[in-house]
Image (cartoon, rainbow, N blue to C red):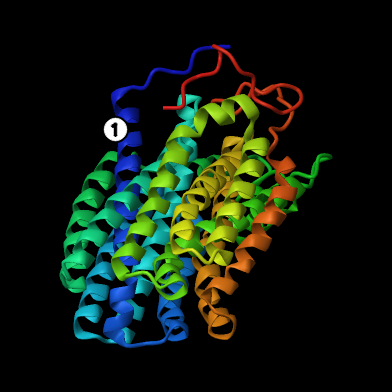
Amino acid sequence: MKNPPVMDTATRRWRAALFLFMLAIGVSMASWVARTPAVRDALEVSTGSMGLVLFGLSVGSMAGVLVSGGLVRRRGGRPVIALGAGLLVAGLAVIAGGAALEVSAGVFGGLALFGAGMGLAEVAFNIEGAAVERTLGRPVLPVLHGCFSLGTVVGALAGMGLTAVRFPVGWHLAAVAVAVAAAGVWTVWAVPAGTGRAEADADAQDPCSGSCSETGDGQRTGRERTGGVRGQLAVWRDRRLVLIGLIVLAMAFAEGSANDWLPLLMVDGHGTSATAGSLTFMLFAVAMTTGRFAGGPLLTRYGPAAVVRASALVAAVGVALVTFSSSALLAGAAVVLWGLGASLGFPVTISAAGERARPEDASARVAAVSTAGYAAFLVGPPSLGFLADHVGLRNAMVVVLVLLGGAALITRALRSPVPDREGPGPGVAASREGRPRTGADQPDLV
């Protein structure tokens, strides 16, 4: 097997920019999550009402997610990331003001702006990350998402400390907004122009130009393959992609449920202090980070299907212990299993979606699966708040258990397709059985 390409300065800067801003997004998300108990107390709302406030994040995020892929195809990734960064900063500022003034509508509106920025930026980042993988010939997305998780650790640590000293939430989030703005400026400068747009333009130059028919393998050719809403819906005709979408939906739901509810789950469900709730979330974030940075050797040796299957089961054990254990200490320790199990689901499924696809198809497939994942990550968990009003927050987590069990049953879809004449996907020397070869010929993950 050929050695992977050596990075030039521009590519190294491109990859570093993606890593930096994903770190910043993680810091901002964890900063909000760690302070949710304080915000809930300041607003004096019930758990169900807090779920309604959190729905602002879901509304904004889904709006951003749904339009991001199309914007990238028309404008390229860089302007979409710039717009997303601007909305993130504006949203954090509005949340800070709403929390300081104790106005629920202000926090809702700020979360909507913040969510829109996150949805726009993160789908564009997945498309950019997949493009870097194709350039380098080795995986990038697990480490990219690991940077997000590392950011959540930093944000959780800061949130825990500031919660302990009763630092005002508004000033905390305003400081985070300044840091995100600085990271966004450098990232937009470093990311090359036209990544997703170049792929769409190449497709537009296809001689079929939107009038081609379906081929024998069920794939569409011409503009219909990636262009417009119909093109985006057409990628879901691939049965394997549908199963990958279901897996990412379940794994992202498990991750998002912890991000939205874990501090309150420990405070309200297990009677811990707000500081202990923030500490528990930090443990989850550390476990997520560890799994994403250290998961490469497992993927190399056992393949994505086996790793994600085991991950789903490990996460299910962690969620079950948090839900059903009567010991707050055991529940707090179990979040490590929850975090380790949920860590690789999202990036591995995103990589699988674009694997061995033509360059002009890859962005559409990655955007489609990213949309499914972020839908679960952002829309699903807030709905648990409404369910929790009837059955309690701990019992509502049974939904997460069911989804994880279902994901474990269909991970076969993550096996690599049989290699075609264009060669294997990024960083994977696939065997005919669809499992990566092991040994010295496997490139490094970072």
**Residue at image coords 41%, 71%:** 264
Viewer-proximal residue, 136 or 149?
149
Q: Quadrant of the C terminus?
A: top left
- Count of marks overlaid on the render: 1
Residue 135 higher or lower than 270, as above or below: above
Q: Which of the 4 image quarters holds residue 29?
A: bottom left
Residue 410 higher or lower than 437, as above or below: below
Instruction: Left or right? Give the position of 334 relative to 247.
Output: left
Residue 280 higher or lower than 383, as above or below: above
Q: Is residue 74 visible?
A: no
Instruction: Left or right? Give the position of 20 relative to 132.
Output: left
Helix, strand, or loop for circle 1?
helix
Instruction: Left or right? Give the position of 276 relative to 332.
Output: left
Disc 1 crowd rating (10 Å Cα; few below 14, some 14-19, many 20+) is some
Q: Which of the 4 image quarters holds residue 114?
A: bottom left
Q: Amino acid at mark 1?
A: Arg
Instruction: Left or right? Give the position of 123 relative to 95.
Output: right
Q: Position of residue 181 (x, y in %)?
A: 21, 56
Query: Disc 1 designates what residue?
Result: 13
**Residue at image coords 67%, 23%:** 430
Q: Position of residue 425 (x, y in %)?
A: 60, 28
**Residue at image coords 29%, 32%:** 13
Q: Quadrant of the N terminus?
A: top right
Q: Residue furthest right?
A: 216
Viewer-proximal residue, 312 or 1?
312
Q: Position of residue 195 (x, y in %)?
A: 43, 41
Q: Is residue 317 visible?
A: yes
Q: Position of residue 367 (x, y in %)?
A: 54, 52
